[in-house]
């Protein structure tokens, strides 16, 4: 069985590296993007099984990237998980119904995020 693929779109290099390592330890192939536009390009190129998306990103914010993902047939049904430092109810409302999870970085451990993604992929 081939590894599950996850695209991690996060501009904080240290956090991106941390989450990448945790996903790799749980048999995921990880693609990393440091900005929204690269994330969109990688999603269309690599066709990940799931996307972890920060909201505050250079070169296209997370909500803009989310709109692109949901408008393309290739990524329309890919589970997307928001991972953000912003407890912004307005952003959460905009993402509602279009993502499988909305998590604050300070309130979820990396392993819990891996578990949420794994559960969505087996559902």
Image (cartoon, rainbow, N blue to C red):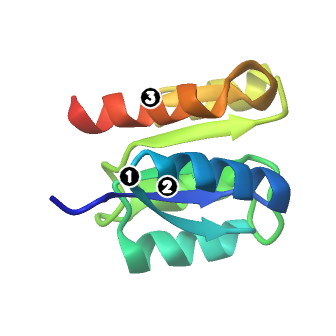
Question: In the rendered image, which residue does mark 1 sit on?
Answer: 27
Mark 3 against mark 1, which lies toward the viewer? 1
* Residue positioned 65% across, 27% down in the render: 103
Question: In the rendered image, which residue does mark 2 sit on?
Answer: 24
Tell whether label 2 touches label 1 (CB within 8 Å): yes
- Binning the other alpha carbons within 10 Å of mark 1 as few (below 14), some (14 to 19) or many (20 upward) gives few
* Residue positioned 35% across, 50% down in the render: 78
Residue 100, can we see it? no
Q: CA distance from mark 2 to mark 3?
A: 13 Å
Secondary structure beneath disc 3? helix
Secondary structure beneath disc 2? helix
Tell whether label 3 touches label 2 (CB within 8 Å): no
Residue 24, placed above or below residue 42: above
Left/right of residue 53 with respect to residue 116 in the rendered view: right
- Binning the other alpha carbons within 10 Å of mark 2 as few (below 14), some (14 to 19) or many (20 upward) gives some
Which one is earlier in the sequence, the residue at label 2 or at label 3?
A: 2
Quadrant of image for the C terminus = top left
Q: CA distance from mark 3 to mark 1?
A: 12 Å
Which of the 4 image quarters holds residue 45? Answer: bottom left
Q: Position of residue 120 (x, y in %)?
A: 33, 32
Which of the 4 image quarters holds residue 85? Answer: top right
Which one is earlier in the sequence, the residue at label 3 or at label 1?
A: 1
Q: Nearer the viewer, residue 59 or 21?
A: 21
Question: In the rendered image, which residue does mark 3 sit on?
Answer: 115
Q: Position of residue 59 (x, y in %)?
A: 79, 72
């Amino acid at each position: 069985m081939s590894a599950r693929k996850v695209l991690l779109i996060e501009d904080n290099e240290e956090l991106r590296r941390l989450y990448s390592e945790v996903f790799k330890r749980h048999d995921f192939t990880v693609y990393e993007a440091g900005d929204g536009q690269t994330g969109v390009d990688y999603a269309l190129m690599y066709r990940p099984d799931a996307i972890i998306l920060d909201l505050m990103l250079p070169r296209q914010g997370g909500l803009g990237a989310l709109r692109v993902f949901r408008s393309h047939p290739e990524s329309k049904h890919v589970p997307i998980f928001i991972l953000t430092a912003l407890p912004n109810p307005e952003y959460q409302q905009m993402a509602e119904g279009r993502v499988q999870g909305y998590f604050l970085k300070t309130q979820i451990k990396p392993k819990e995020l891996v578990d949420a993604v794994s559960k969505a992929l087996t559902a």
